Amino acid sequence: MSVFKSALNQLKTAAQAMNLEPAVLEVLRKPQRVIELSLPLKKDNGVVEAFEAYRVQYNNARGPFKGGIRYHPHASLDEVKALAFWMTIKCAVADIPYGGAKGGIKLDPKKLSEHELEHLTRSYTRALRWAIGPKQDIPAPDVNTNAKIMGWIADEFSNLVGEYKPAVVTGKPIAIGGSEGREVATGTGGFFILAEVLKKLKKDPKKMKVMIQGIGNVGYWFAKASQAAGMKIVGVSDSKGGIFDKRGIGMDIDNLMETKKSKGLLAGCYCSGSVCDCKNYQAVSNQKLLELPCDVLVPAALENQIMAKNANRIKAPIILELANGPVDSEADIKLAKKNVLVIPDVLANSGGVVGSYLEWVQNLYGYSWKEEEVLNRMKDKLAAALHAVWQAREKQKVTMRVAAFIVALRRLGESMKGRGVI
Ligand code: NAD
């Protein structure tokens, strides 16, 4: 199913459950602005290639547009629209003064040199110069983009406007106004939300066996936090495949990352330095990994991983959506029937945008907070968001996703009314 269609299905379901005012639904059915670009790049070998690029500014009723930029060979307008819509909902759930946006360039970063990537990023920034800005639209990292790339955007934008404007992007290097704690915010925030939900369910974190699909920025920092809390990581995967701990006693995430760095692979068996243990660990495909038994399944890679075709094979009773849109709207219905608790992306990974918001505030006011202060402020925001969602879930007897949408749609409706949009 189209990712945007799945996102709109979620909107319709929540709108029905809460009897949403038709005007709010009408406004949110479409993005406010869609920017489609073709960016020519003269590559290092002299060949010119034009890359498709997008920025979707979905809704700014609650504040400037906000959302990451993704570099991926499958980036598409449909995907970027869905991600921009979810950002709108997410910022409202977290109750931070932003609207929602998202950007993407259709490219495989592994096939470009650093010089080529920088050139393309700067040209994307020039093309969007009139549409982005600290009070207009603030990009951030997403899949395959990082602090270095955000630094190029901040620099190019500042050169264009003739004034240093680090607040135009978040997720920057600390040396140019990035925030302590931003890199770890999404994964750590996801862990915090899970720990709070486990408390409500009266489950002991130390007894939880966790399976993580996608061990990039978000998956890695989630793994670090959950391991520190005594949870057992029994399986992980990346785009090349996964491994599963047959013993169920948990693996060490840093040893694993060392192996990935030195060998370029997780799959095959588990190695730490020169020591390999293929007896206790088993290679699995990243699709199969989703279907193995565990207490908490954590999709932290891409959207549409759990769909109608595999939803009934999922064995985990709890799914923590750290990726955006990993469970599509058809799978959602099947999982709800099986009583699987899905902690939705718009809440579970909102630590990222809350961390970004705190970076932006520091940039605007010239503050510089320590990591502890940033993470404590983030936790306060996440605790309030979870509380509001949990209350709506209990009161309306709906799934956590519908509850999160209800919280967000009420807030969006109030802002639209306050501004006279509806
Ligand atoms: P990343 O590029 O750092 O990592 C993505 C990881 O997923 C990589 O390890 C990659 O190998 C793996 N992967 C890709 N396809 C896979 C597949 N089919 N099966 C298993 N693994 C696969 O990206 P990230 O920043 O960690 O983002 C991951 C997800 O979290 C995305 O959905 C993103 O939108 C979402 N997210 C990120 C942030 C953030 O702050 N970075 C915030 C909110 C949400």
Image (cartoon, grey):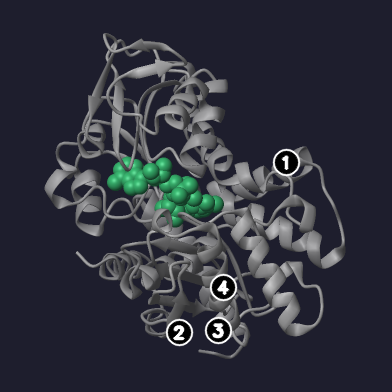
Task: Name the residue furthest left.
Answer: 309
Residue, disc 4: 99
Label 4: how many Cα within 10 Å (few below 14, some 14–19, many 20+): many
Tell me the mark number nearer the camera, choosing from 4 and 2: 2
Label 1: how many Cα within 10 Å (few below 14, some 14–19, many 20+): few
Label 3: how many Cα within 10 Å (few below 14, some 14–19, many 20+): some
Mark 3 residue element = helix
Mark 1 residue element = helix
Q: Is residue 385 in view?
A: yes
**Is residue 182 placed above or below 221 in the rendered structure?**
below
Disc 4 within 8 angstroms of ligand 1 (CB): no
Q: Earlier in the sequence, mark 1 or mark 4?
A: 4
Cβ atoms at labels 1 and 4 below 8 Å apart: no
Residue 411, image x, y percentages: 55, 69
Q: Which mark is residue 35?
A: 2
Q: Earlier in the sequence, mark 3 or mark 2?
A: 2
Residue at 73 percent of width and 54 percent of height:
178
